[in-house]
Image (spheres, rainbow, N blue to C red):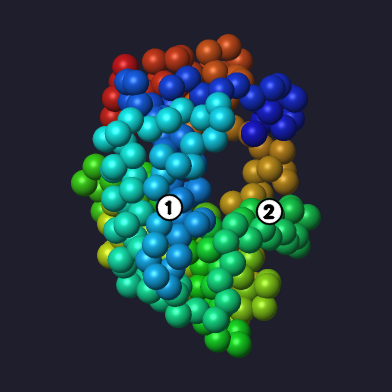
Amino acid sequence: FYAERVLGLAPIAPRGHGAAPDGLAGTERGVLVHAALERLDFRRGVAVPVASLVAPGQTAPTGDEAAELDGLISGFAASDLAARLGRASDVRREDRFTFLLADGVLMTGAFDVLAREGPRRMLVVDYKSDRLSGADPAALLSASYASQRLIYALAAIRAGAAEVEVAHVFLEAPADPVVARFESAQADALELELSALTSGVVQHRFEVTEIPQRSICAGCPAEGGLCSWPLELTRRATVEQLF
């Protein structure tokens, strides 16, 4: 954030972040999966093959990769959560939102899916194509996406929801979504929690991360130069890996 938004340095393409040899990078995998899920018919469970969605200039999946991704999408299409979306009265995909916090920070984003299940009841679904590698979905959510869940909840409440459920579904475990429930009465508390997370930006505190690793540092224009961490740490796959 500091390097790009304050110093004005141009972002750089991540160096093979999430890529397998001769395969899709993690970001490319996510783009294809989301493109297919945008076209998924929740009522009938009909999906579009990912191989048909490769845009010009995008890396095409291998046959095995396409089969894997199609399997992830089919698994979600057969899940209880997809059936619930099929029963919703109003379903919007990639619905963008913007709201302002009291401290002046502007929050923007987009819901993968926003569904209305009643006059003032909403369901937010967020897809995750992360490889679980044996990790517990709830633990991974808490470690990596807790702030995203907070933002989604507050955005839905600001959009008029009296009750909102935020469901993160890791596509490798479609039957085990991580669901949190919120009510409009919690709005002030949620905003205080979110403001605490953004306080560093408001106060112009831009400390270097204490846990450098590829998932945080990939693509940062300060990496290998302005950054105080050496490349062997900013490019490691996990914090347990020293080199």
Viewer-proximal residue among 191 and 150: 150
- Is 18 situated left or right of 242 in this image? right
Q: Quadrant of residue 94?
A: bottom right
- Is 113 situated left or right of 22 in this image? right
Disc 1 to disc 2: CB gap under 8 Å: no
Q: Quadrant where the C terminus lies?
A: top left
Q: Which residue is drawn at 46% across and 55% down?
A: 37
At label 2, the amino acid type is Thr
Q: Name the residue under label 1.
A: 48
Rendered location of residue 62, percent (x, y): 33, 30
Q: In this view, does 43 lie above or below 21?
A: below
Q: Quadrant where the N terminus lies?
A: top right
Rendered location of residue 147, percent (x, y): 52, 55
Rendered location of residue 71, percent (x, y): 29, 50
Quick check: can you spot residue 148? Answer: yes
Q: How far apart are marks 1 and 2 (CA)?
A: 29 Å
At label 1, the amino acid type is Val
Q: Residue at x 68, y 71 (%)?
A: 158
Residue furthest bottom in the image: 119
Which disc is residue 108 wearing? 2
Local packing at callout 1 (Cα closer than 10 Å; few below 14, some 14-19, many 20+) is: some
Q: Quadrant of residue 223?
A: top right
| Disc nearest the viewer among 1 and 2 | 1
Q: Residue at x 59, y 52 (%)?
A: 197
Residue furthest left in the image: 134
Q: In this view, does 145 lie above or below 89?
A: above
First along the sequence among labels 1 and 2 = 1
- Is 74 situated left or right of 122 in this image? left
Viewer-proximal residue among 241 and 78: 78
Viewer-proximal residue among 190 and 140: 140
Mark 2: secondary structure: strand
